[in-house]
Amino acid sequence: MGTIAAALFILAAQQTPADRAIRDFMTDRAKQLERDFLPEVKTAADFEKLRPTLHQQYLDMLGLWPLPEKTPLKATITGKLTDIPGCTIEKLHYQSKPGIYVTASLYVPDPLPDGKCPAILYQCGHSGMGKNGNKSAYQDHGIWFANHGYVCLVTDTHELGEVNTTHHGTYSFQRWWWHSAGFTPAGVECWNAIRGIDYLQSRPEVDPDRIGATGISGGGAATVWISAADDRVKASAPVSGMSDLTWYVGEDGVNGHCDCMFLYNNYRWNWTTIAGLICPRPLLFTNSDDDRIFPMPANDRIVNRLERLYSKFGVSDKVDAMVSVGGHAYRTDLRRAIFEFFNRTLKQDLKSVTDPDMGHTGEKGKYRIEPSRLRVFPEEKDIPADCRNTKIDEIFLPATKTAAPTADGFEAWKKSLVEQLPRAGIRRGDGRALTILKPGGDEGWVVVLNAQDSPSDQLPEWASPVVSGKPFSIVQPSTGWTRKNPPNTVERSMALLGMTADSVRVSELVAANGHLVGRGEAGILAAYAALLRPEIKSVTIVDPPASHQSGPHFLGILKICDIPEALGALAPRPLTLINAKDPAFDRTAELYRLAGAADKLTRK
């Protein structure tokens, strides 16, 4: 049994009843999402009519909608290697956004052939090469492509580049605010690749209409991201980079992957729809038969779906699967199949590739080019002073501010806000049965506990001043499953289903009636439940957090509103805020005033 498979077996054996219950819930949701694949698409025309909407939704789920401004690349070559037969290697960096540096190696044929060259954007997997950048581990591909008439750009990932950050925010570091902000490393890698294509098209040697993309593992996922996002990629060969929800969620496959492998499934797609956006461009879907993190059953399901989609365009021959024998790695047959694919699609060259692998010595850890020679920044002091890579999760997404309504436009503003909540995963029908710790009357006070609170049918001390002497019940939304750091299986899996643990809790609270009262995040969950259910009579929140930056967390909620705006949208229903000292809540008061309901907001 492989290391990952053994870890998954142990994890399953240690599951509590609460673990099994939530896993069953998520597995069922994954099956629902993958029961059909684009059932509304009967013809190619149907898909083309749907494509603009799908493309916008896809970019939104990556955190790339509206598409960022293409600021100057400021591409800079810091050195060249000229001693490798058949190619010149340029060490360069460009800025995908101001201060966001992408380090790369550009392999150029030497001598240049007549006419312009096809180009390959090579996306790296997760190779720990330190300050040399993970691009140095994939030099053999760059050398092969250059020796066969291609210009090849090999880019570092932002986690394992020369200036590295992390792909493991929710996996290892509890950065759940990534969910609320809509930030995912997948979006960064996709944007860096879009700008990489911009750079390739700026090169005089490159034919801008003949660009392909490939890469393995994390680079395979990134190949899918860029190929689905940008139709300038004319041929795509992802290697061991994508599975489906049945594996990721239903069989805990999410545990084998870091955050760059996933977008947030806000629109609740069948996961294969992502790769479907590549259709009808040539696609070689490549894998290995014993890959434990991209297993063959899922591979077969994806390929079958894609073949059916391509068939609607009459180009089933443009999508193919190649399977090698072995584990998660490159082998000669994989390389040759990929090289032949690009020769065929970008050069109309149908000859078999029979030459040996190039660049790698065949000995583990040994490379034809000493990795340090591929450094773009030889020393730490060479990194530009304006480099902001280490703050990428804080600065990559633009700050959003909810527009203020006018007094006569409050109801339309509120309606628009509530209609956008499903995009953040906040909707009816997602919850399981609400855990009722103390039954009470339907019209009384409902005390909502936080997930981390100890279950109890006793009135909490903080609720006594509000509820004392009145009929009440005590409820606690979903809780009790194991949170392991890493990999936080439940919370990370839910994002792939278009929900979060907190949005599931809101859906459970929608069943409540009467007056809701909660402390901290539980109070905010109660407020969102009230937005979904007008029958809830009032909301009282003790110690409310001022921003979703600290929780509760919903998918991309900060692109819609923050807590003060959500609370303001409750107007004209009574809202009581206790210990709401942050000035941010002045925004809530202003919204109540605009709604003509200033007397319905109480701040204590």
Image (spheres, grey):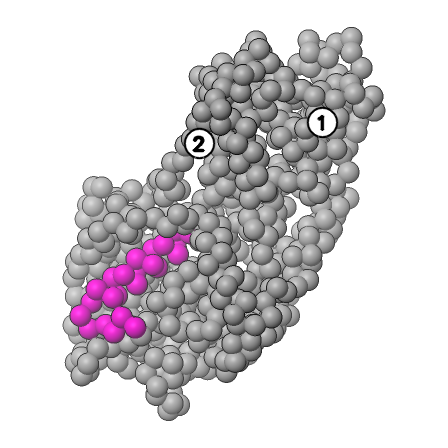
Q: Quadrant of residue 397?
A: top left
> Label 1 belongs to which residue?
535
| C-alpha span from label 2 to label 1 | 26 Å
Q: Residues within 10 Å of mark 2 (few under 14, many from 20)?
A: few
Q: What's the magenta region?
A: 187-209
Give the SS element for disc 1: loop
User: Residue drawn 50% across and 16% down?
Assistant: 593
The answer to whether residue 365 is seen in the rendering is: no
Dominant SS type (magenta)? helix
Question: Is 473 on the left-hand or right-hand side of 44?
Answer: right
- Tell me residue 234's x, y (percent): 37, 72
Query: Could you tell me which residue is drawn at 59 percent across and 74 percent down?
Result: 308
Quarter placement of the N terminus: bottom right
Residue 394 place in picture, x, y as percent: 38, 38
16 to 231, vertically: above or below: above
Rendered-image quadrant of the C terminus? top right
Residue 566: quadrant of the picture: top right
User: Is residue 548 one of those drawn in magenta?
Assistant: no
Which comes sooner in the sequence, label 2 or label 1?
2
Q: Is 292 above or below relative to 466?
A: below
Disc marking residue 549: none
The label on residue 402 is 2
Secondary element at image label 2: loop
